[in-house]
Amino acid sequence: MTLWSGRLSTPMAGTLWELSESYSFDHVLYHHDILGSKAHVRGLERAGLLTADECRILLDTLDLIEGEFASGLFVRAESDEDIHTAIERRATELAGDVGAKMHTARSRNDQVATTLRLFTLDALGDVAAATLELIGVLEEVGERFPEAYLPGYTHLQRAQPVLLTHHLHAHAWALLRDVDRIADARDRMSVSPLGAGALAGTSLSIDPAFTATLLGFNEAFANSMDAVSDRDFVAESLFDLAMIGVHLSRMGEELVLWTSAEFGFATLGDEFTTGSSMLPQKKNSDVAELARAKSGRLVGNLTGLLVTLKGLPLSYNRDLQEDKEPLFDSLRQVVLVLAALAGAYRSIDFHSDRARAAADDQFLVAIDIAERLVGTGVPFRQAHERVGRLVAEALSRDVSFEQVVAEQPELSTYSDVFGSGQAVRSRTSPGASGPLAQMQQRDRLRAAIAAASARVS
Ligand code: ARG
């Protein structure tokens, strides 16, 4: 029997059933759906629509059903179209007419919106925790190699040396913004749609603010039509997840480069690499490649949902059921990548010698010489031009840059800039890549991590 057997006389066509059933993927919402139903039932009692006894029977029944799901003993009936119908059907089986009262003053439209918000609030909390974990690992890796430095790149051309900690912290700051974005999204989605009914509310005297409080939402909806049709919170979550995916993808690409023989800056632990079925010597950074690759489907999930939402008339439309699979997929993929990358970074061996040799590339101090000239009153543009010519001269004569600089009488006292690590030590401006600035940055990062953790815990 369907929920609408009073109205429609023939059973649903098999092909429509296949197309429209959502239990196969939305059963994962059981816990949050039951939370929503328990609050609804208490709201019905408060409104005088259920007796205290009926309320208690329903709460016990819902607990029992939760137990069935948790232990894997819940049996889906053939007619269970989605998680909501499955739970209501089972409640009616267990509690008879009292079970049949549970859906009073409620529609699946406000129910699914409530359930999905509760689920998403929790799931994003898990993503934030996993993101903070990876941020912690980046800090740990930096602390393991406190003196290490490497070339910083622009256009993937060697630019200026940077401390490894500075480099890793750059990723940490990006991930920290992701955590903050999740906190913002959670604040915005903390609005209960329960009580909006199908779209227009109800003639029965329910109190949406009461159930909103029971469920821990910040507030109840203001407009019942908006409440059942709004999936901004899913789109926003998908954006936040895609943004994390993009950050992880960039980190993955960097690990691919670092672990190549050409860079040779790092090796991942064997447990985070794969071999080749044919080439015996291979050690591949698949973890980094998959981190890079997953961003594609994360962006796809966001794009897909936005296209689904575009052009939908108010209020609920069945199209909205298509919100779940992309959301579930993005949540799962992001958590998988966060955990695997955390492990991969934890296993990293950073080859400080090799990175130092690359960062001590003499041309990387060209700017230091120009800045010395600026210190003597030479306008920067002229200093830049002058040093640029010396670089070109070294290249055309095929002699070292240091030698060409030493040959210039007024630059002959600048030889100390060529000292190993000198260029990174002299990056002292606030937020710069040198050790002094780095210490201040570390304090600021730790404070930001504590603030972000507090927002999402
Ligand atoms: N399973 C549906 C969804 O996820 C909820 C049911 C609302 N369906 C309906 N025909 N009003 O959106």
Image (cartoon, rainbow, N blue to C red):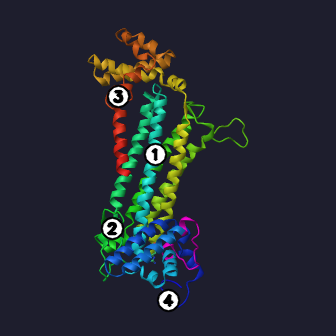
The three-letter amino acid code for the residue at tag 4 is Leu
Query: Are circles 4 and 3 on residues that touch, CB within 8 Å?
Result: no
- Asked whether 456 falls inside the magenta stretch, the response is no
* The N terminus lies in quadrant: bottom right
What separation in Å lies between label 4 and label 2 (alpha carbons)? Answer: 34 Å
Seen in the picture, residue 317 relative to 364 is either above or below; the reply is below
Q: Is mark 1 within 8 Å of ligand 1?
A: no
- What residue is pinned by disc 4? 8
Residue range corresponding to the magenta coloring: 68-85
- What residue is pinned by disc 2? 212
From the top left corner, tell me how far across and down residue 205 is, in percent: 29, 80
Q: Please rate how many residues cluster around mark 4, counting C-alpha atoms within 10 Å: few if below 14, some from 14 to 19, many from 20.
A: few
Checking the image for residue 247, the label placed there is 1
From the top left corner, tell me how far across and down residue 261 is, in percent: 60, 31
What separation in Å lies between label 4 and label 3 (alpha carbons)? Answer: 72 Å
Of labels 4 and 2, earlier in sequence is 4
